[in-house]
Amino acid sequence: MKKKIRILIFFLILVILIILFLILKNVKKETFDDIIFFKLFSQSNSINENLKQNQYIINFKGDKQIYTKVNLIETVDLKKLVKEKIQPGTKGEFEIVLKSNKDIYYKMEFESLNNKPENLNFSIKGQKEKYKTLEELTNSLQGNLTKKESKTINIEWNWEYQKGNNSDIQDTKDGIKLKEYNFLIHAIGNEI
């Protein structure tokens, strides 16, 4: 009887040690993977530090042109997302946070990397004016920035749904060919 209890205790201890070993091995692997990811992420783009999915931070360091690539699917309102695609009826927003180590005059420009759906509109949060393209926003996204302040610009987008028969036909064409909409944000800073 004592021999059976010893064998049972031995196997229980062995099982516990194996479980602990597997848990520790997994924790170390995840920690190592996190360190590798952080190093790669911080080296790949020190200018654009994405703090959250839809926020793009641009740090001006003197006279420079800075750009960052944005995929609109990363900025979508998840409640409106359908099948991981941007479609009529989806909307979202993203923030551009500007910081500088000097007083500068900044100007923001956008460059579409593929065709935008025709009924996709943009606006600056808090303003009523709608823009048919990101490029039209350029004149509204410029001004002075001091080294002591940061400026947050909120851009909202909306692919309007069922605006009329012609719009429905266009939405269908755009929805079939569009998987994602990518664009570049160009930030130009000139020291004052």
Image: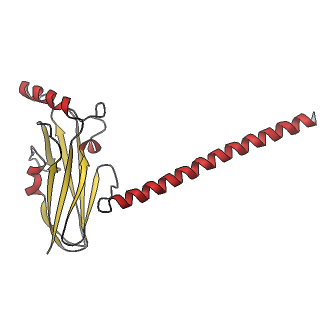
List x then y, in percent, for residue 11: 79, 38
How many marks overall?
0
Question: Which color scheme is applied?
Answer: secondary structure
Looking at the image, residue 152 lies above or below residue 120: below
Q: In this view of the protein, which residue sits in the foreground, 127 or 180?
A: 180
Quarter holding residue 84: top left
**Can the viewer see residue 81?**
yes
Is 119 left, or right, of 146 in this rendering?
left
Residue drawn at (40%, 57%) of the image: 40
Is 38 left, or right, of 125 in this rendering?
right
Looking at the image, residue 83 lies above or below residue 77: above
Residue drawn at (17%, 67%) of the image: 189
**Can the viewer see residue 88?**
no
Is 150 left, or right, of 2 in this rendering?
left
List x then y, in percent, for residue 18: 70, 43
Q: In this view of the protein, which residue sits in the foreground, 60 or 55?
A: 60
List x then y, in percent, for residue 69: 24, 52
Quarter placement of the C terminus = bottom left
Quarter placement of the N terminus = top right
Q: In this view of the protein, which residue sits in the foreground, 173 or 13?
A: 173
List x then y, in percent, for residue 6: 87, 39
Quarter holding residue 115: top left
Residue drawn at (24%, 39%) of the image: 180
